[in-house]
Image: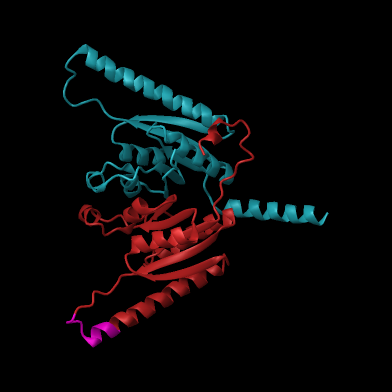
């Protein structure tokens, strides 16, 4: 790709972004992240897939039926929220899909990106404190370090 | 004729959609390693697509706190700085040859802090930087600048991993 800088005529080479994976945690900021990603997708004529990974339940022999039911209900609600977000994006950009996963967020986002052969991952970052960063609570750096394609971080402060 | 209309419609659609993505100034953080030209090339393509200008930023480490032990040590440090400025200038020239408006910003200090400041100075809409996939210890001790940049930046940050050479 660095050849672009060595070639005299660069008009023949175009940046090809066809598939964008958007990692959303479904916090209030996710709508903004999805809207920004939609602008990007529209500009390149790319498809976008919103991905949310629901954390796996730690089931032990002491896990009660009530807890399991609560977990299943949370899971259903989260999946609905993801579908709702995708529907709201589709109103302005129809080429938008939703992918609901269960597991480690960073791992699942990268798996979806690999499966789709995505050209870009868009994710949000929440400016956590030092300890939160150290203990890996923010997913953005984790996604970044596992990704095989460029990652665009749209953080909470960005408008 | 139909094809021409279709092409024109496609171009119109492309132009109208481009204006929605409001990226006018892109700051590209380069460490001037061999991979920097890959990062710059990616930035050039994005800038061409959205019609943005580019500011290439390189941050040189500050002078050591302890005094230089000899004149020679000081001269070596200064020589290193001069060479880095030259390298940055060459990369800027290369970018300009692509038709993109490009300026350089050579800074001294903490890389992440200075890149974020440079972006604020030009009211950048996007920062592009490279990541080098460091090991766990490298991450804990903040050797990879990419996360440090996006925690400080006020605009979106695109991290480009590059391709294997």
A21 vs B118: above or below: below
- Residue B154 appears left or right of A34: left
Q: Can residue B101 be seen at all in this image of the molecule?
A: no
Provide the letter of the chain coloured red.
A
- Residue B158 appears left or right of B63: right
Which residue does the image show at 27% across and 46% down from the upper left? Answer: B135
Which residue does the image show at 35% across and 77% down from the upper left? Answer: A75
Residue A73 percent across, percent down from the top left: 34, 82
- Residue extending furthest toward the top: B71
Which residue does the image show at 20% across and 55% down from the upper left? Answer: A131
Nearest the eye: A87 or B132: B132
Is residue A65 covered in magenta? Answer: yes
Magenta range? A61-69
Question: Where on the picture, by quarter, is residue A142?
Answer: bottom left
Which residue does the image show at 49% across and 57% down from the upper left? Answer: A117
B38 vs A138: above or below: above
Q: In which quadrant of the rendered image does the C terminus of chain B lie? A: top left
B149 vs B108: above or below: below
Residue B64 percent across, percent down from the top left: 21, 26
Is residue A53 covered in magenta? Answer: no
Provide the letter of the chain coloured cyan.
B
Q: In which quadrant of the rendered image does the N terminus of chain B lie? A: bottom right
Q: Can residue B115 be seen at all in this image of the molecule?
A: yes
């Amino acid at each position: 790709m660095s050849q672009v800088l060595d070639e005299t005529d660069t008009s023949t080479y175009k940046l090809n972004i066809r598939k964008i994976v958007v990692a959303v945690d479904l916090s209030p900021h996710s709508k903004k992240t999805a809207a920004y990603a939609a602008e990007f997708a529209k500009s390149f004529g790319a498809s976008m897939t919103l991905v949310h990974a629901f954390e796996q339940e730690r089931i032990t022999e002491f896990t009660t039926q009530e807890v399991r039911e609560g977990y299943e209900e949370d899971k259903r609600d989260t999946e609905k929220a993801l579908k709702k977000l995708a529907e709201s994006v589709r109103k302005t950009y129809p080429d938008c899909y939703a992918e609901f996963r269960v597991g480690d967020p960073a791992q699942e986002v990268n798996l979806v990106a690999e499966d789709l052969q995505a050209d870009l991952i868009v994710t949000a970052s929440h400016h956590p404190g030092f300890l939160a960063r150290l203990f890996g609570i923010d997913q953005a750096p984790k996604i970044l370090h596992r990704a095989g394609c460029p990652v665009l971080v749209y953080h909470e402060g960005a408008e | 004729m139909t094809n021409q209309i279709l092409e024109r419609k496609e171009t119109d659609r492309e132009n109208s959609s481009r204006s929605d993505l409001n990226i006018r100034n892109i700051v590209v953080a380069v460490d001037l390693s061999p991979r920097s030209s890959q990062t710059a090339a990616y930035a050039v393509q994005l800038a061409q697509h959205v019609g943005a200008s580019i500011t290439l930023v390189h941050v040189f480490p500050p002078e050591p706190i302890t005094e230089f032990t000899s004149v020679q040590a000081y001269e070596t440090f200064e020589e290193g700085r001069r060479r880095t400025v030259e390298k940055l200038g060459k990369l800027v020239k290369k970018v300009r040859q692509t038709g993109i408006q490009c300026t350089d910003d050579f800074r001294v200090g903490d890389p992440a802090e200075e890149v974020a400041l440079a972006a604020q100075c030009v009211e950048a809409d996007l920062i592009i930087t490279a990541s080098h996939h460091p090991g766990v210890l490298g991450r804990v001790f903040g050797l990879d600048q990419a996360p440090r940049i996006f925690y400080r930046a006020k605009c979106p940050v695109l991290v480009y991993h590059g391709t294997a050479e």
